[in-house]
Amino acid sequence: MEISLTVNGEARTLDVPDNTLLVDIIREHLGLTGTHVGCDTSQCGACTVHMNGAAIKSCAVLAGQADGAEVTTIEGIGTPDALHPMQAAFRECHALQCGFCTPGMIMRAIDLVENAAELDGQAVREGLEGNLCRCTGYQNIVKAVLTAAESA
């Protein structure tokens, strides 16, 4: 199946089997390895990206569903010299350890900040429920999200 999508602002056309997952398109076909595969069951959130402006778990999206979509991955939100405010807050607040969950957590947190009416610690915890971190306590992650929200 041929699909066309825009990834990190670049139009792409790919020929992939119709059962290909968006996460595999991103990682295997486009070489953007910041999006991680953690569970293959849509439970951990390591594969979270933005599709058409909303945070989604890319392991649960088939190629056909992504046809015509605008996708933003962790590679599309900042650079090493100009971090996205959420990336900067995660660094500043020590909100990561091994880093495996971090790209998905950041992508979900950006969506949360952009769409939440009001954010406090409880709202952040509830908003990040679908993203798991096995290394940290969530306190510094919550702090980072609130720090980024204040600067937005």
Image (tube, rainbow, N blue to C red):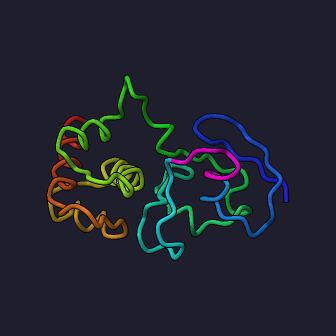
Where is residue 52 drawn, in percent x and y?
A: 56, 50
* Quadrant the N terminus occupies: bottom right
Residue at x 49%, y 57% (from the top left corner)? 36
Number of numbered markers: 0
Residue for point 25% across, 68% down: 126
Q: Position of residue 35 (x, y in %)?
A: 51, 52
Residue nearest the observer in this picture, 116 or 82: 82
Residue 98 lies left or right of residue 56; in this view the side is: left
Q: Position of residue 62 (x, y in %)?
A: 68, 66
For the C terminus, the image quarter is top left
Residue furthest to the front in view is 98
Reply above or below: 3 against 86. Answer: below
Is residue 30 a member of the stretch shown in magenta?
yes
Which residue corresponds to the image point at 61% horizontal and 52% vertical from the top-left? 27
Residue 9 picture quarter: top right
**Depth check, front residue: 65 or 98:** 98
Measured as percent of width and height from the top left, residue 13 is found at 79, 44
Q: Residue furthest top?
A: 81
Q: Which residues are magenta?
A: 26-33
| 98 displayed left or right of 10 | left
- Residue 88: within the magenta? no
Above-or-below relation of 110 to 21: above
